[in-house]
Amino acid sequence: MLISQALASTATATTDAVAATGTPPSAADSFMWNMGLILVMFVLFYFLLIRPQQKRLKTQQALLSALKEGDRVVTGGGLVGTITKVINDSEIEVDLGTTKVIALRYTLTTRISGTAPQAAK
């Protein structure tokens, strides 16, 4: 008894929708509507996620290529030091105060404006 009432209400809802619009949507119309929504989703995905990440990557690469001796930098681990020597394209020697370490260039996150204060002699 309950099943027949459920089927009857679904059938009347479908016929009411068809009667209101005149014709049911065709398969091609439904397909184009769905493809349009997917296209909009990809455009939003590009502008909200991919494009900002590419901009950040460009600025980071510009920062890393402009590093020179005497610059104060922050490593990925949060250590602050001064570049004492550029070894090659991928390695930099960083003075952390009491010790000098060799860091990979891509692990440096930021450059602190200004140079390191000179030690009093």
Image: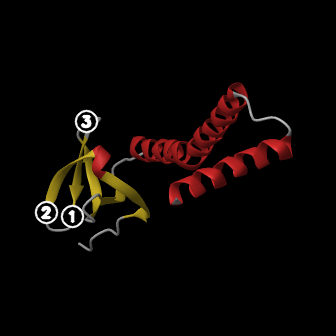
Q: Say if mark 1 contacts mark 3, CB within 8 Å.
A: no
Classify 10 Å Cα crowding around label 2: few (below 14), some (14-19), many (20 and above): few
Q: Name the residue under label 3.
A: 88
Whole-percent x and y of residue 120?
A: 27, 74
Q: Position of residue 7 (x, y in %)?
A: 59, 50
Write down the residue under mark 1. Answer: 96
Q: Which of 29 and 12 is in front in this view?
A: 12
Residue at 65% across, 29% down: 31
Residue name at image x 28 percent, y 65 percent: 78
Please report whichever mark, 1 or 3, sits nearer to the chain's N-terminal start.
3
What is the secondary structure assignment of the residue under circle 1? loop
**Residue 84 against residue 87 in the figure, above or below:** below
Q: How far apart are marks 2 and 3 (CA)?
A: 20 Å
- The reply to whether dot 2 and dot 1 touch (C-beta < 8 Å) is yes
Pointer 2 or 3: first along the chain: 3
Q: How is the image coloured?
A: secondary structure
Residue 50: x, y in percent? 52, 42
Looking at numbered disc 2 in the image, what kind of residue is underneath it?
Thr
Q: Residue 99 carries which label?
A: 2
| Numbered label tally | 3
* Type of amino acid under label 3: Asn
**Which quadrant is home to the C terminus?**
bottom left
